[in-house]
Amino acid sequence: MDCIFCKIISRQIPASIIYEDDKVLAFNDISPKAPVHVLVIPKTHVDTVDELADMSVVADLFLVMKKIAAEQGIDKSGYRIVVNQGHDAGQAVPHLHFHLLGGRSLLGLSIF
Ligand code: AMP
Ligand code: ZN
């Protein structure tokens, strides 16, 4: 499949991977909007929220995001989780991904 995030999962293209288990991969965003800007994705390709049928994926992703927030030391200061769905939201990569952002005040941050 010609999907950039699937290629990161299969190590066909490099990324700064910070977490992996059998269902979830997390890596640093290549164009970070905050000191912590991690993309958290399901390993099974799904285009968008709208295409998502298996909602257990959402629980898997949230558990990993909580774990990463604690590891990166932003669990107490606060963080933002963003999902862009489709054209009007500016979704650029059609593989479902959650942005985890933190490490500074995010008030006024536009995504994207
Ligand atoms: P979105 O607009 O929600 O689809 O966000 C896509 C995100 O993927 C953007 O924040 C990009 O900076 C990021 N991105 C695109 N290509 C890569 C890559 N090869 N490695 C890491 N992040 C990427
Ligand atoms: Zn994909």
Image (cartoon, rainbow, N blue to C red):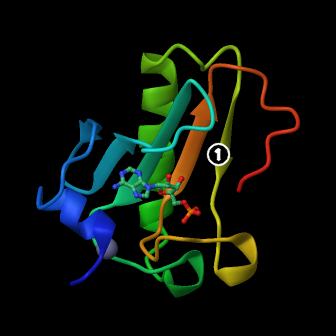
Tell me if residue 97 comes above or below residue 52 in the rendering: above
Q: Residue furthest right?
A: 108
> Mark 1 — residue?
81
Q: Position of residue 60 (x, y in %)?
A: 41, 52
- Asked which quadrant contains residue 56, the reply is bottom left
For image coordinates 20% across by 59% down, the residue present is 9
Element at badge 1? Answer: strand
Q: Position of residue 54 (x, y in %)?
A: 43, 76
- Asked which quadrant contains residue 57, the reply is bottom left
For image coordinates 27% across by 63% down, the residue present is 43
* Cβ of mark 1 under 8 A from ligand 1: no
Q: Position of residue 13 (x, y in %)?
A: 17, 57
Tell me if residue 73 comes above or below residue 7 in the rendering: above
Q: Is residue 27 left or right of residue 84?
A: left
Please give the count of numbered marks on the rendered protein: 1
Q: Quadrant of the C terminus?
A: bottom right
Mark 1 is surrounded, within 10 Å at the Cα level, by few (under 14), some (14 to 19) or many (20 or more) other residues, namely some
For image coordinates 45% across by 48% down, the residue present is 39
In this rendered view, identify the residue nearer to me: 80 or 37: 37
Q: Quadrant of the N terminus?
A: bottom left
Q: Is residue 94 left or right of residue 111?
A: left
In this rendered view, identify the residue nearer to me: 103 or 73: 103
Q: Position of residue 81 (x, y in %)?
A: 64, 45
Amino acid type of the residue that numbered disc 1 sits on in the rendered structure: Ile
